[in-house]
Image (spheres, rainbow, N blue to C red):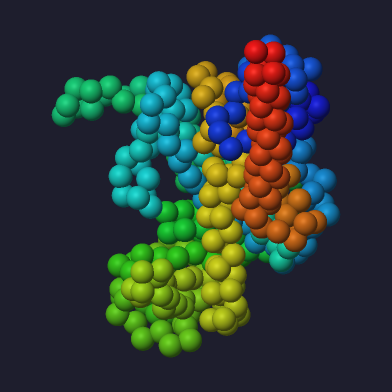
Amino acid sequence: MDKGMLGLYTDYLICSTSYTTATGLSRVTDKVVSHDRITRFLSEKDFTASNLWEFAKPIIRSVENEDGVIAIDDSIEEKPYTDENDIVAWHYDHKEGRTIKGINFVTALLRTEEVSIPLTYCLVKKTVKTMNKKTGKEGRKSPITKQQMYRDLLSAVVANNVLFKYVVNDVWFASTENMCFVKDILKKDFVMPLKENRKVALSKEDLALGKFVSIKKLELGEGMQVWLADVDFPLRLVCQHFKNEDGSTGVLYLVSSNIELTYEQITAIYKKRWKVEEYHKSLKINASLAKSPTKTVRTQANHIFAAICAFMKLESLSIAAKLNHFALKDKIYISALQKAFLELNKIKMTVRSKVLQTVKGV
């Protein structure tokens, strides 16, 4: 991997407010870096999660601690006008409740008290062709489920010896298999939400007898110990009431594998999951994830890799400058706009001078 080109390209992604192209970056450098070199950087080889770890490792080692939280979530970068291929495909967005055409990716994000750093990621590649028996239409699917990706990403985090204590995720990943994987295989704890129609046993004896009750019927107070079918350890269940931006209220049922945690501790840990939402937003807006017109699977995937690296740069700069990503981007934009005004005034003065000279000549 050409680290010099990666540094230049990620700077370009941070500074850009429009489409990011090889021609555009070449022009920014006054063609010192050629269009062809930038194109080769994006198209010669595949950038992988291992390359991302190489980029992230120095930052991680400087900020990690044993109380770290790993947040795992997926996002879709919409590509409505791009031709379909193995990564640009139709994906069901469980948050939007609809199918979206774009690139779907899953990220494992480390959250400490100071920073949010993406550790590893996986693109959903729909390489298997399918046939809808009812409609006769062809489709695509990934040979690996996102639930398996969840476990693979966590395995990679552990293999890289990253310090952390808890795993958090949304309800989509709150399967019993994932719970057992985190607790029994990785020897870590988690905080996960449950759907309100999920049923629990109130004692180990009830679990053995198959006696379950819906969690929405429980009077939880500060929480209680419960058991889930196919989960071989008790859980601490709490109910959190919250207010939405539109003024409406909602309920969140959270379970933790650490039964010693209080209500306040469980809700505080789960609150850190929202940092992954901020990561997705900043990645798309401030790191130019959505601004690449690349056409091939490799160049599209490599642009996503570079955008994630650009996010990490922004995070480091954010800590140093004591500004959030959006404030940093705005500062860069205002500075560029000021220079644009100066350049415009120079042009106007040159034009006026030429007009005056022409008039005098007449």
Identity of the residue drawn at 56% across and 33% down = 18
What is the quadrant of residue 133 in the picture?
top left
Looking at the image, residue 105 sits to the left or right of residue 34; the answer is left
What is the quadrant of residue 354 in the picture?
top right
Looking at the image, residue 20 sits to the left or right of residue 138; the answer is right
The answer to whether 222 is drawn above or below residue 189 in the figure is: below
Q: Residue 337 versus residue 6: which sits nearer the camera? A: 337
The answer to whether 322 is drawn above or below residue 82 in the figure is: below
Q: Residue 51 versus residue 277: which sits nearer the camera? A: 277
Give x and y (percent) for residue 269.
59, 70
The answer to whether 236 is drawn above or below residue 301 in the figure is: below
Give x and y (percent) for residue 222.
48, 86
Identity of the residue drawn at 66% across and 47% down = 334
Give x and y (percent) for residue 179.
51, 59
Report the number of numbered marks: 0
The answer to whether 207 is drawn above or below residue 74 in the figure is: below
Which image quarter holds the C terminus? Answer: top right
Res. 128 visible in picture: no
Which image quarter holds the N terminus? Answer: top right
What is the quadrant of residue 250 in the picture?
bottom left
Res. 346 visible in picture: yes
